[in-house]
Amino acid sequence: MSTSWMTSNKLKSVSKALVSLGILAYLLWQIPVQEVVATIPRLGIIPAAALSGLLALEVFLSTLSIFILTTYYTDLTFYRMFKIDAANFIANVFIPSRLGSVISMPVLIDRYTSANKAEGAVIQTTQMVIVTLITGGTAGIGWLIFQDILSTEMSLTLALCVALYLGFPVAVVTGILLSDINIVQQHIISRLPIPEVQQGTRIDPRRLLASSGCLIAARVILAGARLWILSIVFGLDLGLLEMLFIPVLMYSVTVLPISLGGIGVAEASGTAVISALGVPVAVAATVIFIDRIFTTYLPLVGFYAYVNLTGLPDRVVDNNTTR
């Protein structure tokens, strides 16, 4: 790995961190901070406990989705997969690319399971295709339903994000279909984060369905449940369509490669979209702040502390030995 490449990525991470800080500073300047602070205590212990339960369930389902795919290639415990997934989550807050997990997860799978790096690439790319289809599809439907209430700038931005999400599975499928053409393989596909799908590496369709079900539950249904709880606590008048599509739509901006882990842009987009539904800005900002705590910041702190306290699994040579 060249020094210039590492320096370039460090500069990208620093620039994205500065963008995140700038957007957060702008939000603090624009929203009525005192009203937000005064509104937060309305959350209460019981709703906070319910949100914590949803967070635990979301983490479980997310790990289960990739565990189902990984066990097609190798035997491992769910606990080991959880540690690998936690390390991958932490790494991808700092990797200067939304597709960073396509790079980091195969390395972790190769190091801490008996599957090799190529198999890890197929596993992670498969999950990424499922995630982008679910996110892009759900956000796209939400955009079609709610575009009329959004500002022109917000509507165009979210439309771009939907296109970016759906572009990844299109690129993967195109790469697979064209992978037998040597010149395309050499000059185009080899430059993309798309693993070559050889005979025997295709994942069982039943596992794809099971993994997809876990991710739909984690990323769409549980996200709607969080918004439902917060709407009850803060008196938001939201219907079923808002519950199902708004959470995915408003956070789809995290696909834009301009901030560190989506920090700042997610809060800005979420506040703007919730406000467009007729919710006062202070209440909208409070809802987004609390939701982001339970979806991003608590997992980040918790995973970081957990991995540092317990360490990563032993490195695996094969199914029976470790090093």
Image: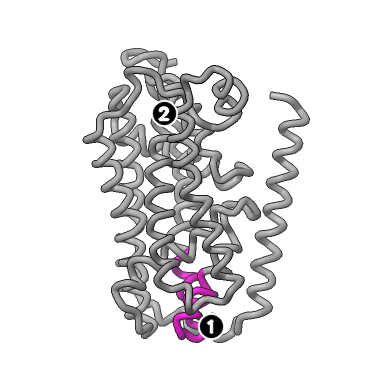
| 1 vs 2, front mark | 2
Name the residue at 44% across, 41% down: 169
Name the residue at 46% across, 41% down: 170
Tell me the distance, in whole angstroms, between the alpha carbons under discs 1 and 2: 43 Å
Q: Secondary structure at mark 1?
A: helix
**Compared with residue 62, is residue 51 higher up or lower down, i.e. above or below?**
below
Q: Which residue is mark 1?
A: 281
| 91 relative position to 120: left or right | right
Label 2 Cα neighbours within 10 Å, binned few <14 / some 14-19 / many ≥20: many
Q: Position of residue 193 (x, y in %)?
A: 54, 32
Mark 2 and mark 1 in contact (Cβ < 8 Å)? no
Of the residues shown, which amino acid type is indicated by label 1?
Val
Work out which quarter of the rendered image holds the C terminus and state it.
top left
Name the residue at 50% across, 40% down: 308
Task: Farthest residue to the left: give it.
Answer: 206
What is the magenta range?
270-292
**Could one spot residue 57 in this view of the protein?**
no
Q: Which residue is mark 2?
A: 122
Of 306 and 50, nearer the camera is 50
| 228 relative position to 257: left or right | left
Q: Position of residue 223 (x, y in %)?
A: 36, 62
